[in-house]
Amino acid sequence: MQSIKKVSIYFMGLAYCYVGIHHFIDPEFFLAIMPDYVPFHIEAVYISGFCEILLGGMLLFVKTRKIAAWGLIALLIAVFPANIYLAQNEAAQHALNISQTAAYIRLPFQALFIGLAFWHQKN
């Protein structure tokens, strides 16, 4: 089980870094799922991307893993409204070329990622 956990830690850490980098390379992708009620859209995209890179990198090191995991849990909760918006908004679905069914299927994965982050923070 420890080897599975170690692989998942490194995979998730690198995945968060990868997605975080894409916030800067292709911010339009993330802007498409930004709910109207969230202020400072582009700034929120850049801040969340920075946090993903930082926390994903921190997840890779034992000394910072617990802080990173709790930070990722908070970040995943904070960005969940964007996933709900995607599931409910046809224009956002069209912009990302995703069906409403696929957008709804994505929603439970947020809970899975939160669960993984919680598992990663434990020794």
Image (tube, rainbow, N blue to C red):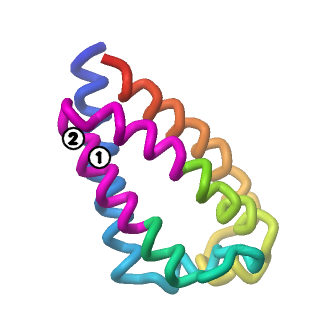
Going by the image, does 11 lie left or right of 20? left
Q: Quadrant of the N terminus?
A: top left
Magenta residues, start to end: 49-75
Residue corresponding to mark 2: 60
Question: Where residue 74 sits: x, y (%)?
Answer: 53, 46
Q: Would you say residue 36 sits in the magenta stretch?
A: no
Residue corresponding to mark 1: 13
Q: Residue furthest top?
A: 1
What's the residue at 55%, 36% (across, down)? 112
Question: Where residue 66 sits: x, y (%)?
Answer: 34, 31
CA separation in Å, label 1 and label 2: 6 Å
Picture layout, residue 56 above or below residue 122: below
Picture layout, residue 29 above or below residue 54: below
Q: Would you say residue 52 sits in the magenta stretch?
A: yes
Question: Where residue 22 sits: x, y (%)?
Answer: 36, 73
Q: Secondary structure at mark 2?
A: loop
Picture layout, residue 87 above or below residue 22: above
Q: Residues within 10 Å of mark 1 (few under 14, many from 20)?
A: many
**Amino acid marked by disc 1:** Gly
